[in-house]
Image: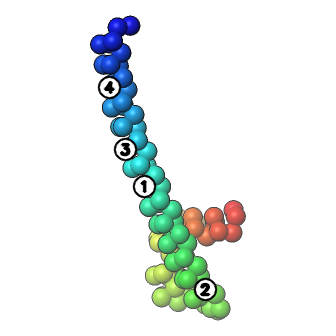
Amino acid sequence: MDKEVYQRRRADLGRLAEKFDADIAELEQKLKDAETMKDDNLSQALSVMKKYSGADELTQAMVQELIEKVVVTDPEHVEIVWKFKDEVRNFIGI
């Protein structure tokens, strides 16, 4: 390999390394943002659960804060989709 080819390849690889460094930095920032959002969601879920932990009955306020939607497929089957399902499951280890 002559000097010219070597220098061209080195420059190409240098640009590629810079691109990879920029991609890594961007992905690390996205990971940090996702972890922060996850922590915020868990904190919010825990706050709402503590707020209603002693409740004896379901109120409209609880429904608005805890339930995302209710799916009725037929008169005998109802599915409740909770707002904080993933956070709660991860927190309790399911």
Residue 68, placed above or below residue 62: above
Residue 29, placed above or below residue 43: above
| Quadrant for the C terminus in the image | bottom right
Q: Which mark is residue 22?
A: 3
Question: Of the residues under marks 2 and 1, which one precedes in the sequence?
Answer: 1
Q: Amino acid at mark 4?
A: Ala
Question: Of the residues under marks 4 and 3, which one precedes in the sequence?
Answer: 4
Q: Which mark is residue 17?
A: none
Question: Of discs 4 and 2, which sits in the foreground?
Answer: 4
In depth, the one of 13 and 26 nearer the eye is 13
Q: Position of residue 85 (x, y in %)?
A: 57, 67
Label 3, secondary structure: give it.
Answer: helix
Which residue appears at 63% of the width and 64% of the height? 90
Which residue appears at 29% of the width and 13% of the height? 4
Residue 60 falls left or right of residue 85: left
Question: Of the residues under marks 2 and 3, which one precedes in the sequence?
Answer: 3
Label 1, secondary structure: give it.
Answer: helix
Q: Are marks 2 and 3 in contact (CB under 8 Å)?
A: no
Which residue is label 4 attached to?
A: 11
